[in-house]
Image (tube, rainbow, N blue to C red):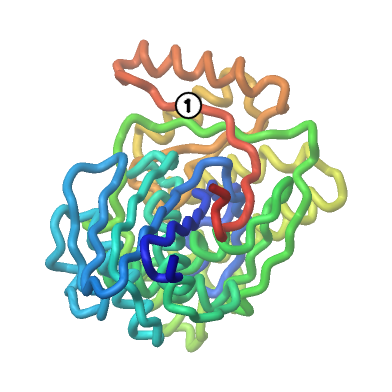
Amino acid sequence: MAADDLTVRRWRAPGRINVIGDHTDYQDGFCLPMAIDRECRVTVRSTAGTPTITATSAQEPGTVVVATDGSTDPTTVEPAWGRFVAGAVAAGTARGATLPGGTWTITSSVPAGSGLSSSSALSVALVLAAVGLGGLHLDPVALARLALDAEIRATGVPGGLLDQMTALHAVPGHLLLLDCRTLTVEPVPLPRSLGFVVVHSGRARTLAGSGYAERRAAVEAAAAALGLPALRDATPDQVAHDPRARHVVSENARVLAFADALRTGRTDALGPLMLASHASLRDDYGVSTPELDRAVDRLMAHGALGARLTGAGFGGCVVGLVQRNHADDIVAKVARDLVAAGVTDPLAFAVRPGAAAGVAPD
Ligand code: GLA
C-alpha cells in the first residue's frame, strides 16, 4: 500500500497541571508544570488525491472539513472545536508542510474547559500530525511555538508557551522547571511519597472572553512603564504599588523557591508556597472565583499539604499536593463536599506525571 493511501498514523499529547507559577509565562518568567496521565489523540487515515481533511471528535458533536492547503480560515469553522484543526493545518502549511487529505479522528481524556490544558493537548497533537504528515522535522521548542501559533489562529487568545512546552518536554516522574525567557526546561523529580489531585471548582472556564488578555495587557504596560523588557527583570520594590505586577514578581520567586525545596528535600515548604500562590492569584491578580477558593478550602480541610488554582483561573480546576497514599481518600471527601454544596457530577481525581507528546502507540 502506498504511504499516502489509507495509511493510519497516530499522535498524542498530554494535558497538564501547573503546580506553581501562573501568569508568569508571558512575562518571561518561571513556571513549574507537570504533564498528566490524560491525553488527546489524533488518528489520521490519509487518502491519495483528496484535497480536504474531514475531522471528527469522540467528545464533541459535528464534522469539520478543512482544505489541506491551509486556505480554510480557522475563525469561520463551526463547530468551534474544528477551529483547532484548521489552525493546525494553517500553521503547519505556513511552515512549509504539504498535507495529504483524509480523515482525522480526535479523542481526549483531558476534561474540556477545566484549566488542564485540553486545548493545548489538542493543538499539540494536531500540530504533530500536521508536521509528521508534512515531512517537517522540528525540535520541541519549535513545535511548541507552532502549536501556540495554531491555537492563536483558532481562538485569538494571546496565550503564553507554558502549556505547549509542558506537553512537548514532559518527563515521567518529574515536574518541569520552565524558564520562559530562555525556553529551557529542567526536569525536577517528584518524590515518590507525594502526588497531586485535581478538583474542578464547578464553574467552567473559557479563556476567550475572560480577563486573560486584559491581565496580560496590564502587566505588559507595567513592564513598559518601568522601561523593562518584562517583569522577570523587576524587583519587588519596583512593583510594590501595583498588585498585578506584584503578583508576577512574587510568583516567580515562589516558583524558584518551590523547585529549590524539591531539589533539597524540604517538602514541608511546598504546601505553604502553593497557598501563597493561590492568595496572590486571588488578591493581587484577581483571577480566582469563590468556587475556586472553596475547592482550595475543601482540599486543605481534608488533608492536602497545599492547594491552588491551576492555569489561567476564572473557573476551572484547583490542584492539591497530597501524600500519595492519601490521594484517593481526599478525592472522595472533597467530591462529597462539592455534592453537598450543590455541584452535580463533581470532577475530582488523582493525577500522575505523564509522558511527552509524540507518536502514539497503536
Ligand atoms: C493559560 C495560558 C498559559 C498561561 C496560563 C496562566 O493556561 O494558555 O500560557 O499563561 O494560562 O499561567
Amino acid beneath label 1: Ala
Q: Nearer the viewer, residue 231 or 144?
A: 144
Q: Residue at x 19, y 42 (%)?
A: 61
Please tell me whether mark 1 sits on a helix, a strand or a loop: strand
Decide: is 9 above or below 110: below
Q: Residue at x 41, y 46 (%)?
A: 115
Q: Residue 103: x percent and y percent?
A: 29, 58
Q: Residue at x 55, y 80 (%)?
A: 137
Q: In the figure, is residue 243 to the left or right of 308? A: left
Q: Residue 312: x percent and y percent?
A: 41, 53
Mark 1 crowdedness (10 Å alpha carbons): few <14, some 14-19, many ≥20: many
Q: In the figure, is residue 105 to the left or right of 252? A: left
Q: Residue 46: x percent and y percent?
A: 35, 64
The residue under label 1 is 348
Q: In the figure, is residue 3 to the left or right of 170? A: left
Q: Quadrant of the N terminus?
A: bottom left
Q: Nearer the viewer, residue 235 or 2?
A: 2
Q: Nearer the viewer, residue 311 or 169?
A: 169
Decide: is 58 above or below 171: above
